[in-house]
Image (cartoon, rainbow, N blue to C red):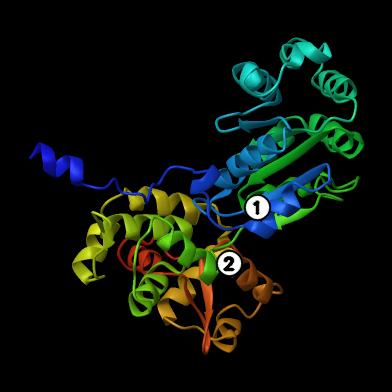
Amino acid sequence: MGNEKRNMKENPYTLMPVSGEAFVGRKDLLEELLDDSSRHLLIGAPRIGKTSVLKQVQYLAHQRHQPAFYLSLEGVVNYEELQTSVYRHLRREKFKWFDFERIGFDPRSFEKENFFDALFDLDEKLDGQSLFLLFDEAQVLVEIGRQAPAFLQKWRGALASLRSLKTIFAAFPRILQVNELFEETSPFTSGLPIEYLSVFTASEAEEFIRRPGIKIQSAQMAEIFECTGRHPFFLQILCGALYTNGTLAKLTPEKFRAAYNSVPLHGILLHAFNTLSDEEKAVMQAVHQKDTASLQILRSEFPTSRSLESILDRMVSYGYLKKASGGYKIINAFWSKWLKEEMPEPVAA
């Protein structure tokens, strides 16, 4: 038994965020995020890989000897907590990635002093040396902005004038609601380059599957693509369930059920579904009911919608739907099963 365990190969398809050599794809996006622009907004649905992208930006920045700090805003509910969160992240990682004392800056400034004074002081003391602040779960800015719109307005202005600090915000699509808080001024995202994170391309998905040294036939690859829609999270789940000691088993209904039940998808997909607007939810439900829904059919179901085509494009981009011959389909078998068995009550658009 001991020899058997030693000979077993560890399953390489992890559900955890990855970086470094384990990271796959997104090359053009990473080049955009690492360019000379001082700020970016990365938008993507839950589980599409935003955290892994930020971690890879951090990894690549360090390879270039540029300090980069990953800061999760998960659970932050007001701007006071945001200030504290920034300080704690910088304090926890400062000795690993950057010596603030060398430039005469104390990270405690973010907690003890005015947030923007600390921001500008750090930017000035960096004196042209780039430092990345990588904000994950940035959709919390919508609620912070509702509570303290002046804080968000100041931050928008600060972002435009920073020279050395480079900020990347990663968030769910609802981050764009923050613009509704800026009725009398320019939107928060004005002048902010926006990058959308979608499913893998065919070449990226193939690299993901083969990267651990897996040998796989084209027909089996096509089955996995169809089942997952090349969505990174569902590729991880399915390949993880199919993996056995260096090989991928044949995809069967039993293997798919095992993959579906291997993680708590009910809560995960319900959360992802609830990040959509009511109109987006209704469109997704309508597509599911029709299996393949043409644009003409969807127009008849949503006759008053002035943005139906934009909604469909967004939902394809976010990895909820896919374009197919004759119209639109649900992105993959996982979402289809959930919508069939566990879908909430129909939503009125």
Crowding at mark 2 (Cα within 10 Å: few <14, some 14-19, many 20+): many
Circle nearer the viewer, 1 or 2: 1
As measured in the structure, the alpha-carbon distance from the residue carrying label 1 to the one carrying label 2 is 12 Å
Which residue is denoted by mark 1 in the rendering?
43
Q: How many numbered marks, from 0 up?
A: 2
Is 324 situated above or below 75? below
Q: Is residue 96 left or right of residue 110?
A: left
Q: Residue 170: x, y in percent?
A: 65, 45
Residue 108 visible in the snapshot: yes
Residue 215 locus on image (x, y percent)? 34, 67
Give the vertical position of 239 relative to 294 (above or below): above
Give the residue type that dot 2 points to. Met
Q: Residue at 37% across / 51% down in the picture? A: 13
Name the amino acid, label 1: Ile
Can you tell which quarter of the image residue 235 is in?
bottom left
Residue at horizontal 85%, vertical 24%? 126
Categorize mark 1 by other alpha carbons within 10 Å: few (<14), some (14-19), many (20+).
many
The answer to whether residue 347 of the structure is visible from this angle is no
Checking the image for residue 137, the label placed there is none
Residue 315, label in figure:
2
